[in-house]
Amino acid sequence: MSNPEQNPSGTPDPYGTPQDPAAGQAPQAPQYGAPAGGAPQAPQYGAPQAPQYGAPQAPAPQGYGAEAPATDPGKTLGIVGLVLSILGCTSLIGLILSIVALSKSKKAGYKNGIALAGIIVGAVLLVTSIVVGIVLLVAGGAAVTDLLEACENVSSGDTVVWEGQQVVCP
């Protein structure tokens, strides 16, 4: 004869609950929101999911194209280009980097004022440095020509006075 207080192995149940739901108690209904089959299961692929409440989400992007970047992709490059444009010896490099930065920003749909400033500053300083270089070459050439004319009638190694200083002729 079986005792309802014992489980099938014959040991008494310390809590006094029957092991078989059909042994005397009706099964309990699942709580609200809990799955009816016991342990929760992951939704199957393609199965409809429960509606989610709250703010509506933007639809997922369609197609294979890349998403628009959250920040301007040419911003950092534009800053580097502006800094290099300000330096006289690297104005050409700064000009090129600023053009690349502006191009990247335009493709992403952003305006890049820093890159535009780098282009303007780089172009102005590049033209200015070219003009100054040409003027210095012409002035240096004229000075060398003037020195050679002063040494024309003197033998090599002799000194002449040229613009107030003694110079050894080549």
Image (spheres, helix red, strand yellow):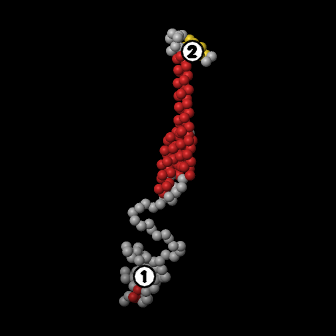
The amino acid at mark 2 is: Val
Q: Residue 87's x, y, as percent? A: 56, 39
Q: Quadrant of the N terminus?
A: bottom left
Residue at 51% across, 47% down: 98
Q: Position of residue 24 (x, y in %)?
A: 42, 89
Disc 1 from disc 2: Cα separation: 108 Å
Report how many numbered discs are placed on residues in the image: 2
Q: Residue at x 49, y 46 (%)?
A: 97
Disc on res. 167: 2
- Residue receiving disc 1: 36
**Does 41 appear above or below 117?**
below
- Where residue 79 appears, as percent x and y from the top left, is 55, 48
Q: Is there CB contact under 8 Å for labels 1 and 2? A: no
Quick one: label 1 or label 2, which is nearer the N terminus? 1
In the image, 137: left or right of 21? right
Q: Nearer the viewer, mark 1 or mark 2?
A: 2
User: Residue 133 occupies which quadrant of the picture?
Assistant: top right
Task: Residue lying at the far right in this picture: please name it.
Answer: 164
Q: Circle 2 sits in a helix, a strand or a loop, which is it? A: strand
Note whether 41 is above or below 162 in the view shown.
below
How far across and down, in percent of the image, does residue 108 sit? 48, 57
Name the element at disc 1: loop
Viewer-proximal residue among 149 and 39? 149
Amino acid under disc 1: Ala
Q: Is residue 40 above or below residue 25?
A: above
User: Which residue is at the front of the view, 71 or 151?
Assistant: 151
How crowded pointer 1 is (Cα within 10 Å; few <14, some 14-19, many 20+) is rated as few
Q: Residue at x 50, y 51 (%)?
A: 102
Q: Residue at x 54, y 35 (%)?
A: 131
